[in-house]
Image (tube, rainbow, N blue to C red):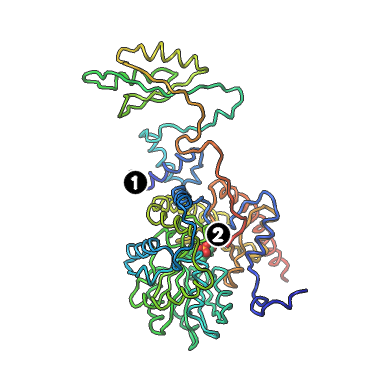
Amino acid sequence: MSDRFLSKTASDLEPSGIRRFFDLAASMEGVISLGVGEPDFTTSWKIREASILSLEEGYTSYTANPGIPELRQEIAYYYASKYNTAYDPLEEVLVTVGASQAIDLAIRAIVNPGDEVIVVRPSFVSYLPVVQLVGGVPVPVDTTDVTHFIPTVEQIEAAITERTKAILICSPNNPTGTVMDKKSLADLAELCVAHDLVVISDEIYSELSYDEPHTSIASLDGMKERTIIINGFSKGFAMTGWRLGFALGPEAIVQAMLKIHQYTTMCASTTAQYGALEALRNGWDDVVHMKKSYQRRRNYIVRSFEEIGLPCHKPGGAFYAFPSIRPTGLSSVEFAEALLNEEKVAVVPGNVFGPSGEGHIRCSYASSMDHLQEAIRRMERFVSSYLASSQEEASEAVSTKP
Amino acid sequence: MNEKEIEVLEIIEHNGRQSIDTIAKMIDLSVEETAEIIKHLEDKKVIVEYAAVIDWAKVEGDSTIKAMIDVKVTPKREVGFDEIARRIYRYDEVKSVYLMSGAYDLSVTVEGKSMAQVAQFVSEKLSTLDSVLSTTTHFIMKQYKHDGTIFDEGDSDKRIVVSP
Ligand SMILES: Cc1ncc(COP(=O)(O)O)c(C=O)c1O
């Protein structure tokens, strides 16, 4: 065994629960997948075309480390026009390799070993490991469907210590689809100002907010100077494979992120940056079209889950439903494995997003209506057999009582 | 037209066979409310017909020939182009008629069992109509996309089965 070559950090790192489930699902034929965390749309042709054109014109060298200036300009304009928050495109905007790299850079730029970062859970799988990789201490705040997965001020306040440096939030959320309303964001903002905390706000799903316009916490009073916005092109523009994201924040932090970016990555892909430029300039009709389509599928899947006996809060954004599977009496892993084996529907067990995800499964509705309908038919068959047996068990338990 | 009515139209334009139950869930109304909207749209002839988009090229033995014909006409006083358009669209061979701006006046789609049949229709029926000045016939050789539907090959789902 060559384990002895591994760094302690690398060997201590937990493999992603999603990864494990992926291997299982990928080995089977004929699976309908609700396990996919990415749009089912192909990037719109005009964006692909703009990238091809950039190649034809010979844009094949490095760009400036923080990204091509026109793209930073468009990103700054996007936040200025949508959220009324002004960022200097030259100093306060950084183009990254996906939102993923932006999260990593943000953490690396602010966290000292031993610093605590509050992470609202259920959460995207990379948040905790990324904090751990720099020797930081993730402090989970676990939310439940009782509060629609929105943390209460009391919960957050209870988690704050002298070592707390930052709080990481994600709205709309992966895996719950929850959108933090303006009031909860304002309460959180007040707390962060009072305790002098940085907020890392993952807004990768901001364009997929269905019931109300998305609010960026950076636009609230006193927050711009303490918020690092993480966003990107993966979800709203259906560009996951392009690996293009960005961060906006206070100059000092963004410049620190830029230093790390410059030494570790140089710059994001040039070809992708030209595609992204076209996306921000001319891609909005497609965003609206895709969003409308997700919204209808959300409505469909949430009501269908309720009908087949899986209680499901109505998520305000992203493309995930996070129904409760407790009525079946199964754990989330048991449910997901049995559903895959018996009915060939892949979902992600909620517990991979933290213990507060237990009792739930993540179902992506970024799938055609035909697939969703078939998935619901299969799940109905599956769930009804377990509901029947868990009711039998319950009644047996009653009848065998002395 | 209200928002929900437009949503219904968008959904069934894409898939005319979608069940009322599914449509109701998608637009977040009750089945009864949705059925009422659909009935209303049918009554008002906003929904004209439920049709399927078929790739006849895949049907063995099908020899349907399609042509698009540019037609120049002299419009008539009072009735303009409408009278001649009506005379043309009543033929069974004619599948669509549009009034166009630009180099010609009417765009007419004609279907027949053979090129000869279509040619015959154009030369004997269409060209000989009183107000028709000239026709230019373009035979359709292959259909790539029709009414927003791509015939070539669907974009297959290239995503991995489970992802973050
Ligand atoms: C909450 C969240 N943040 C970040 C990412 C990563 O996005 P990107 O593809 O831009 O790296 C994802 C992708 O699933 C996500 O769900």
Residue A124 marker: none
Q: Which residue is mark 1?
A: B2
Question: Which residue lies most toward the bottom here?
Answer: A162
Where is residue B88, by image quadrant? top left
Residue A27 at what x, y percent from top left? 70, 55
Amino acid type, callout 1: Asn
| Image x and y of residue A153, in percent | 44, 78
The image position of residue A249, as x and y in percent, is 40, 73
Vertical order, B7 against A100 (above or below)? above
Q: Residues within 10 Å of mark 1 (few under 14, many from 20)?
A: few
Mark 2 CB lies closer than 8 A to ligand 1: yes
Cβ at disc 1 under 8 Å from ligand 1: no
For mark 2, does the 10 Å Cα neighbourhood hold few (<14), some (14 to 19), or many (20 or more) residues? many
On the same chain, marks 2 and 1? The answer is: no
Check the residue under mark 2 and report the chain it is in. A
Q: Which chain letter goes with mark 1? A: B
Task: Identify the image quadrant of the N terminus of chain A.
Answer: bottom right
Q: Residue at x 47, y 64 (%)?
A: A245
Which part of the image, by quadrant, shows the C terminus of chain A? bottom right
- Tell me the residue that label 2 is attached to: A37
At x 37%, y 35%, the residue is: B46
- Quarter of image, res A182: bottom left
Indicate the secondary structure of the residue bearing disc 2: loop
Q: Is residue A203 visible?
A: no
For the point 47% across and 21% down, which residue is it? B111
List x then y, in percent, for residue A208.
44, 59
User: Viewed as shown, does residue A74 lie left or right of A30?
Assistant: left
